[in-house]
């Protein structure tokens, strides 16, 4: 970043980190998850801050809680689904409040670019009566992060800073300011505040309600909310034709689509300011509320007795865009204007019940076309499809190939290995959330007929296992469930950009740290059958899996260990596999691996030298020796 006092183009995540550093944050923690990951990675480059990757989001939030209680400003960062993991301490912390400021960054993912659901975490603010701040660009991300700590301390409350993917991963100008140090607040022993037992919680709940009332008053005057009223929007009667209530990324879309119309921008996303919103609504003929995902603000406005136009014209799923907002408003107003010209009676009643998107004649179509392109037709000439695949040389590919060969039922998990569901591997049967594979496999094992149950395995990554796979493994041991757990250990948190974790031996600063032994941990949980195998050795992997699947008392753990191909130094400079066309019988066995380094030339493979890293999995799959390795295949050694 540029020196203090200058302006830099920062991603939203970088701006959040910068704002936290400038605000005097002393502890920052999180768990990697797109779109939030770069916040902690950026924080790791600042001095005067303790930064860590926690094993999961619950631990991250608890570390931030402890730091806050101890008197240091603290921040916990995670993607939206991570807040579900942290929800237990989060809800209690709303009663407890803070000592020094504490901020929870929730990076939501409209459009599900890298997530299993669309989750609107503004509800977590309302759920716990905790304020939510929502920036619209990187500059506001910096400003709002700093403001969040001030609000936290002023109102004795945790604060949620909500971003979305388009804020997290887009650049805009940010004014860089110097760090403002805050002396640590003294820790005062206060069990009635920090020990949440029923007797204390009953005393704290009225304080939470009173705090909510004061926050609502704050919403009426804070500069986080602002009214934008262009002079040209006002008519002779002092009102405007239309006005928008919006915030966050949706604000940018509205402002670009309707630059001359009034906007009430909610930077304090929750609670909303009742008086200010009623006054704004009284000054516009049509009140629109534009927000991504849930009708959250729409519900708040309706609770104030207002009647905004919201999700009846704007989509409730996926991201918005300038075109979507412009087209929806144009369609609505064209339908309304056409309705006003219709005679009374049945025709008017029919038109009134029609949705604008269904069309009401040429007038509507012309109006929509004038306002902007139809987003549905914007992709009339789409780019060629490029489905996600495991990287060339990915060690998970061999494991999924063998799992499919053995016709097993695979309970999957969140990570690179989720791609095992894609053809031709097609090996994953379930994926729910972080750490759910083992519990799901236990349920399948206990519910299926014996023959089918004996073929159930759970697949989980090394980072995910540490995150939330240990407790279900203990469940399997405790209840003697004969299930096989395959830990796909690629020595990193690969899908989010190769962050360290306790079993990788690297911390957030990429320094060596004590490496958690997965074998030792499994045995400490009570697992007696623990195997370690190199997934690039397909024969050895199949032998180990068959042995682990044999009946036993309690679970078996198979650690499929090889370093991610993107960071495995042993693969650098290796010669690609060679193809012998004379030996090829065009059986297609090699294509069952789904390796992008094997292109199709009819029914024959064509080696892509620029992609092939010489993992030799295809060499082992070819029954005729048409694929030839220029070296001996590696054994079961650990790849570090």
Image (cartoon, rainbow, N blue to C red):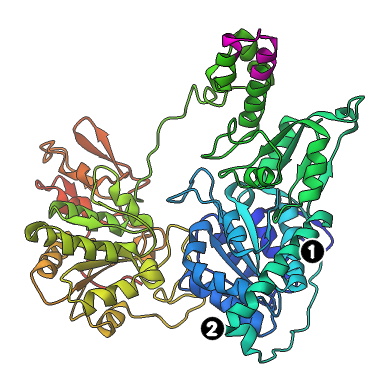
Q: Which residue is denoted by mark 1 in the rendering?
A: 3
Count of numbered labels shown in the rendering: 2
The vertical placement of 635 against 345, above or below, is below
Q: Residues within 10 Å of mark 2 (few under 14, many from 20)?
A: few
Residue 629, how many percent across, how many down?
21, 54
Q: Is residue 252 left or right of residue 379?
A: right
Labels 1 and 2 touching (C-beta < 8 A): no
The extreme bottom residue here reads 189
Residue lying furthest right: 236
In the image, 28 versus 560, the foreground residue is 28
- Residue neighbourhood size for the residue with mark 1, other residues' Cα within 10 Å, grouped as few (<14), some (14–19), many (≥20): few
Q: 622 and 103: which one is in front?
A: 103
> Image quadrant for the N terminus?
bottom right
Residue 445 position in % (x across, y down): 17, 63
Observer able to see residue 537: no
Q: Which residues are magenta?
A: 335-348
Residue plotted at (49% across, 21% down): 380
Q: Main secondary structure of the magenta part?
A: helix
Q: Residue 236: x percent and y percent?
A: 92, 24
Marks 1 and 2, Cα distance to the nearest angstrom? Answer: 48 Å
> Disc number at residue 197?
2
Residue 205 included in the magenta stretch of the image:
no
Q: Residue 465 in the image: x percent, y percent?
A: 35, 69
Asked if residue 439 is positioned above or below residue 620 in the image, the reply reads below
Q: Residue at left 17%, top 52%?
A: 404
Which dot, 1 or 2, sits closer to the camera?
2
Sequence-wise, which precedes: disc 1 or disc 2? Answer: 1
Q: Quadrant of residue 244?
A: top right
Residue 391 in view of the camera: yes
Q: Is residue 176 above or below residue 115?
A: below
Q: Helix, strand or loop at disc 2?
A: loop
Quadrant where the C terminus lies?
bottom left
């Amino acid at each position: 970043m540029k020196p203090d006092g200058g302006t830099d183009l920062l991603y939203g995540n970088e701006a959040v980190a910068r704002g936290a550093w400038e605000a005097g944050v002393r502890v920052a923690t999180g768990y990697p998850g797109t779109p939030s990951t770069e916040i902690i990675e950026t924080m790791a480059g600042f001095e005067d801050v303790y930064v860590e990757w926690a094993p999961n989001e619950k631990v991250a939030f608890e570390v931030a809680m402890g730091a806050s209680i101890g008197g240091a400003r603290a921040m916990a960062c995670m993607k939206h689904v991570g807040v579900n993991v942290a929800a237990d301490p989060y809800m209690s912390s709303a009663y407890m409040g803070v000592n020094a400021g504490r901020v929870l960054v929730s990076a939501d993912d409209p459009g599900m670019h890298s997530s299993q659901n669309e989750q609107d975490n503004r509800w977590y603010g309302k759920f716990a009566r905790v304020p939510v701040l929502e920036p619209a660009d990187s500059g506001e991300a910096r400003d709002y992060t700093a403001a969040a700590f001030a609000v936290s301390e002023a109102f004795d409350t945790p604060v949620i800073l909500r971003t979305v993917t388009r804020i997290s991963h887009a650049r805009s100008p940010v004014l860089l300011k110097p760090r403002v140090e805050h002396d640590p607040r003294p820790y005062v022993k206060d069990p009635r505040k920090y020990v949440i037992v029923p007797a204390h919680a009953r005393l704290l709940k009225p304080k939470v309600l009173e705090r909510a009332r004061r926050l609502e008053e704050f919403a009426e005057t804070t500069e986080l909310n602002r009214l934008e009223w262009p002079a040209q929007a006002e008519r002779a009667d002092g009102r405007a034709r239309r006005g928008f209530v919006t915030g966050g990324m949706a604000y940018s879309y509205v402002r670009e689509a309707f630059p001359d119309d009034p906007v009430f921008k909610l930077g304090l996303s929750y609670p909303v300011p009742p008086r200010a919103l009623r006054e704004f609504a009284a000054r516009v003929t049509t009140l629109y509320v534009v927000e991504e995902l849930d009708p959250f603000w729409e519900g708040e406005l309706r609770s104030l007795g207002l009647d905004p136009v919201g999700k009846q014209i704007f989509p409730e799923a996926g991201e918005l865009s300038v075109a979507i907002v412009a087209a929806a408003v144009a369609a609505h107003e064209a339908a309304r204007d056409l309705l006003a010209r219709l005679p009374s009676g049945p025709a008017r009643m029919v038109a009134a019940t029609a949705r604008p998107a269904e069309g009401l004649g040429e007038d509507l179509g012309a109006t929509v076309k004038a306002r902007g392109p139809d987003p549905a037709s914007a992709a009339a000439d789409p780019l060629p499809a490029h489905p996600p695949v495991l990287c060339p040389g990915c060690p998970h590919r061999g494991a999924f190939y063998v799992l499919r060969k053995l016709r097993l039922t695979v309970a999957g998990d969140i990570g690179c290995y989720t791609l095992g569901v894609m053809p031709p591997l097609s090996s994953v049967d379930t994926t729910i959330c972080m750490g759910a594979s083992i519990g799901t496999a236990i349920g399948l094992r206990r519910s299926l007929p014996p023959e089918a149950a004996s073929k159930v395995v759970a697949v989980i990554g090394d980072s995910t296992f540490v995150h939330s796979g240990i407790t279900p493994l203990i469940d399997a041991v405790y209840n003697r469930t004969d299930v096989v757990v395959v830990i796909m250990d690629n020595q990193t948190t690969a899908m989010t950009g190769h962050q360290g974790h306790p079993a990788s031996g690297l911390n957030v600063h990429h320094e060596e740290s004590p490496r958690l032994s997965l074998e030792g941990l499994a045995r400490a949980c009570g697992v007696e059958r623990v195997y370690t195998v190199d997934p690039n050795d397909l024969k050895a992997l199949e032998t180990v899996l068959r042995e682990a699947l044999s009946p036993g008392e309690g679970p078996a753990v198979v650690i499929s260990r090889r370093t991610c191909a993107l960071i495995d130094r042993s693969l650098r400079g290796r010669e690609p596999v060679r193809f012998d066309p004379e030996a090829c019988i065009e059986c297609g066995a090699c294509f069952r691996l789904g390796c992008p380094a094997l292109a199709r030339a009819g029914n024959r493979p064509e080696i892509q030298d620029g992609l092939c890293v010489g993992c030799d999995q295809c060499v082992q799959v070819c029954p005729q020796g048409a694929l030839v390795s220029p070296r001996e295949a590696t054994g079961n050694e650990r790849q570090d």
